[in-house]
Structure formats: C-alpha cells, structure tokens
Image: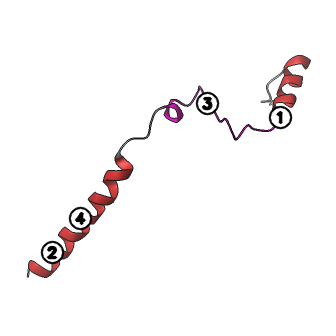
Amino acid sequence: MDTRDSKSREEEKRHVIGQRMPEDYEHPEPDEEQPEAQSPPTRLHRILPIIIVLVLVAGLAFHYLGR
C-alpha cells in the first residue's frame, strides 16, 4: 500500500524550495496552526515553585511537629 502524498511537479518544487530555505531566527513568527504559540504564557510558572515549597514545608512540619 502506497501512503505517500501525490504531488504535482509545481507542488513538489515549492516543497523542496521551502525545505532548503533557512529558518529566520531573528524574526520568528508563531505558527498559525499552533494557537498556544501565539498566546502569552500563563502565570503557572510563577505559582508552581511557591506551591512546591509550601507542600514541602507542610510535609516537614507534619513530620516533625505531628508526633
């Protein structure tokens, strides 16, 4: 069974040229198909360390003071 996409000569030529062009790292643009790349990051990366520290402190307090 052949699962390759059949492309016309023009489509194949555009594909090869697109593969050969270097990526523009100075002006990257988010991919339209990836909405998460366009949205700003959430605040989870700031809250997560605080939650981890609180859980560790609560665990240590329970371990040493709970006896």
- Image coordinates of residue 38 in percent, x first then y, are 51, 31
**Residue at the farthest front position:** 26
Question: Of marks 1 and 4, which one's residue comes earlier in the chain?
Answer: 1
Q: Secondary structure at mark 1?
A: loop
Mark 1 vs mark 2, CA separation in Å: 58 Å
Is residue 27 in sight in this rendering?
A: yes
Q: Would you say 47 lies left or right of 39 here?
A: left
Confirm whether the magenta stretch covers residue 51. Answer: no
The N terminus lies in which quarter of the figure? top right
Q: Residues within 10 Å of mark 4 (few under 14, many from 20)?
A: few
User: Which amino acid, mark 2?
Assistant: Ala
Mark 2 vs mark 4, CA separation in Å: 10 Å
The residue depicted at 46 percent of the width and 32 percent of the height is: 39
In this view, the residue in front, 27 or 63, is 27
The numbered mark at residue 21 is: 1
Q: Would you say 35 lies left or right of 3 here?
A: left
The residue depicted at 8 percent of the width and 82 percent of the height is: 67
- Image coordinates of residue 54 in percent, x first then y, are 23, 63
In the figure, 16 relative to 25: above or below?
above
The numbered mark at residue 61 is: 2
Q: Which residue is mark 3?
A: 31
The numbered mark at residue 55 is: 4
Question: Of marks 1 and 3, which one's residue comes earlier in the chain?
Answer: 1
Mark 3 vs mark 2, CA separation in Å: 47 Å
Q: Secondary structure at mark 4?
A: helix
The residue depicted at 14 percent of the width and 74 percent of the height is: 62
